[in-house]
Image (cartoon, rainbow, N blue to C red):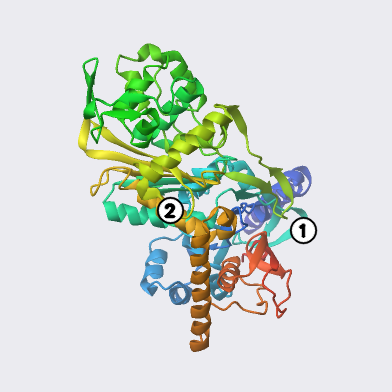
Amino acid sequence: MNNSRALLILIFILVFAVLIIVRLVDIQVIDRENYIKLAELQQTAIDKIKAEQGLIYDRNNDLLVYNRNDVKFYIDLNMTKENEKDSVASKFAEVMGKPKEYYLNLMNKSKNTIVLEKKVQPHQFQKLKDLDIKSLYYRPSPTRIYHYGSLASHVLGYVDQEGKFVSGISEYFSKDLEGVDGYRKVYKNSFGHIVYYDENEMQLPIPGNNIFLTIDKRYQLILEEELNAGLREFLAKSATGIIMNPNTGEILAMANIEDYDPNCYWQYDSFQRRNRAITDPYEPGSIFKAFTFAALIEKNLLSLDEKIFAENGSYRFKNTLITDNKSFSYLTAREVLIHSSNIGTAKLSQRLKDEYFYDFLRRLGFGNITSIPIKGESPGRLWKPNNWDASSKPFISFGYQINATAIQIITAFSALINGGILYQPQLVSKKTNSKGELIEEFKPKFIRKVISESTSSVLRGILAEVVKNGTGKNASLGYISVGGKTGTSQKLIEKKYSNEFHNTSFVGFFPVEDPQIVILIHYDSPQLKKSGALVAAPVFKRVAERIIEKNFNLFEKYIDDNYKKKILISQSKFEQLKSDYEFNNQSELKYKPITFMPDLKYKPLSEALSILNKSGINYKIIGTGFVVEQSIKAGTELKGDEVCELKCNSFHIINASQR
């Protein structure tokens, strides 16, 4: 029996050994390639390197949007000891400013890999990266930073939580800004964490292109501040403003109040995030009379000095009542526009053939999009003549039965005053690559000639009288010539025109003899004062005054000599006050620029920008992340006109060991 048992055991061992040998032969010889591939899949991976998104600048090279190189921290709870959880929670609580219990609760709710923090900023990352916990690791999680918060938010757009560009020029130029992702072959340990990567199997990402706007940050700030002040002063629902160069179509500022902060866009509703300057058409009211007069003058259908009977303020036209705010008997054609007579304009419009008037307005861009480089633009509404009734033409002539957006109105108005040329609105001046090399430059885009230079000249003269002697008096600056037109229209509420809610507008330009700036101001439903003359015109005046002060040299030759003296006296007083301030506050020196170049190397870009902006040093940015080079060495004495070029990158995070 013993020999039989021994024999059975021996046979079993021999069979087991044979099976092992067969299996080893299968693994090492027959299926060798498959197992090598399987091992490689377990130990290696292709890791995507996200391309840095392009930067956005204003027309003066002021950086508006950049990337902050945040990281995301993970922890594998399967491989984490209890005492390590306590260490992690304590350190994260200390650095991130959250309760220790917050992190302990996170870790106790799961046994898998969890995210501890989605956005750890660079200065926080430096304090956390040396935590010696094998189950703790991190990955790049860049954050798009809008340097000035809500400034120009409707122009810029934002990046959502999935990293997708939404609205504004960011969405329109998303392919340029995104760049091209890279990759690297990485090797992992038994925990699945990256140990190192193979430099021979690595493709670096190509950063996105940089976008330079036509927006002037200084003008944008002025416009937003004054729109906000008017919103509070007149208790309006919302406000919109646009500043444009009428000779090129370049938009120098565009704002909607209320607006939003793209850094935390989720805290705002769709109304606040919507660029209403291009999406929300409205009946413009008496501003439209300027376009009606342009059509009449271009066709030689009126004499400016001919008399028009204004019906003493009330006129029934084919069973439709048309009224004026003031009662006039006779007005010259010129005075009809100066005093904004609905009755006079309606009578004069009857000289226009329906098809000609419609075609003229279409040529100015009404009823069609302007093709501004922002998605979501509304074409407004301009009915074809076969849909008009007896009242349509006279009502269209003074801004009813037609809907237009703010961008359509200011674009068309610019054509009336610039010599008759319609330009496409422009928001982007050029694109460069991450090294600052020019890729594409955007020139003014001519659309068509809409009126003659002589018609444009005549209109400028009448619009100047509107501001000097007519409904636009509250827009007058006194020291520089201004032209413009007020507009007030009742809002259509439940198919009835409301006596309570109005659209109030003013569109004006200066100087009259050589228009350089055109500004549109629009308020929706102001409760205190309800006309364009009393609401929008004063806001235009404040915006214009501040623009001239900010860029005095551009307008100096157009300004009255007496005012120039006041400016010089004012500047002299400011210099004295500044000198006194510096003398009495040597510890702060808030106004005095630094005289030596600071050391910016290895600082986060956000910190470097803060130092440069406070110091008044001009700069040019190449790349993003941390400053690795500065063109002006630290300690160099500054004269005040230098431009410091900062080269930045963020590969310190890409290359960091992700244990």
Of residue 39 and residue 167, the one placed in the foreground of this image is 167
x 49%, y 86%: residue? 585
- Disc 1/disc 2 C-alpha distance (Å): 65 Å
In the rendered structure, which amino acid carries the disc numbered 2?
Answer: Leu
According to the picture, the residue beneath numbered tag 1 turns out to be 199
Can you give x and y, in whole percent of width and height, for residue 4 in the image? Answer: 64, 54
Q: Closer to the camera: disc 1 or disc 2?
A: 2
Q: Is residue 275 visible?
A: no
Residue 16, compared with residue 620, is above or below; it is: above
In the rendered structure, which amino acid carries the disc numbered 1?
Answer: Glu
Give SS at disc 1.
Answer: strand
Of residue 316 and residue 234, the one placed in the foreground of this image is 316
- Crowd class of label 1 (few under 14; some 14 to 19; many from 20; radius 10 Å): few
Can you give x and y, in whole percent of width and height, for residue 151 in the image? Answer: 47, 55
Q: Is residue 53 left or right of residue 350?
A: right
- Crowd class of label 2 (few under 14; some 14 to 19; many from 20; radius 10 Å): some
x 42%, y 65%: residue? 107
Residue 63, compared with residue 602, is above or below; it is: above
According to the picture, the residue beneath numbered tag 2 turns out to be 477
- Which quadrant does the N terminus fall into? bottom right
